[in-house]
Amino acid sequence: MNKYLLRGIVFLTAGIICVFLGYTLMENENNWYKLLMTLGVIFFGIGFVALMYRIFRKIDRKALIDDRKEQQEK
């Protein structure tokens, strides 16, 4: 597994759990939900960016390999 894929999955999961716990605390009228919801959104955002970065790196790597292959054939 790529480190960016692993980090992305971990942060996405942590963000979803924090948001879910925040909603639960909000229903119980606990003020800690604000902090958990904020952390959840931040973690989710970091996870999403890490996953997108992995995808762009993979596409860029394939393009570089193809370019080098074409240069070697010349």
Image (spheres, rainbow, N blue to C red):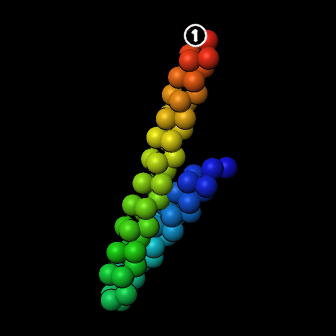
| Residue 65 visible, this orientation | yes
Q: Is residue 64 left or right of residue 26?
A: right
Residue 44 to residue 36: above or below:
above
Q: Amino acid at mark 1?
A: Lys
- Between 32 and 59, which is closer to the camera in this rendering? 59
Q: SS at mark 1? A: loop
Q: Quadrant of residue 32?
A: bottom left
Name the residue: 49% across, 35% down.
60
**Residue at x 40% of width, y 74% of height:** 39
Q: Quadrant of residue 31?
A: bottom left
Q: Nearer the viewer, residue 62 or 29?
A: 62
Relative placement, left or right, of 55 versus 40 is right
Give me the residue at 57% from left, 24% from top: 68
Classed neighbour count for the residue bearing mark 1: other residues with Cα under 10 Å, few (<14), some (14–19), many (≥20): few
In this rendering, the count of numbered labels is 1
Residue 48 in the image: x percent, y percent?
Answer: 43, 54
Rendering quarter of residue 49: bottom left
Of all residues, the one furthest to the top in this rendering is: 74
Where does label 1 land, which residue?
74
Give the quarter of the figure containing the C terminus.
top right
Left-right relation of 36 to 57 = left
Residue 23 appearing in the image: no
Near-viewer residue (31 or 41)? 41
Q: Position of residue 56 (x, y in %)?
A: 46, 40
Residue 28 in picture, x, y percent from top left:
37, 85
Residue 23: where, in percent of width, then height?
38, 74
Please say if 47 is above or below 51.
Answer: below
**What residue is drawn where x is 56% and y is 16%?**
70
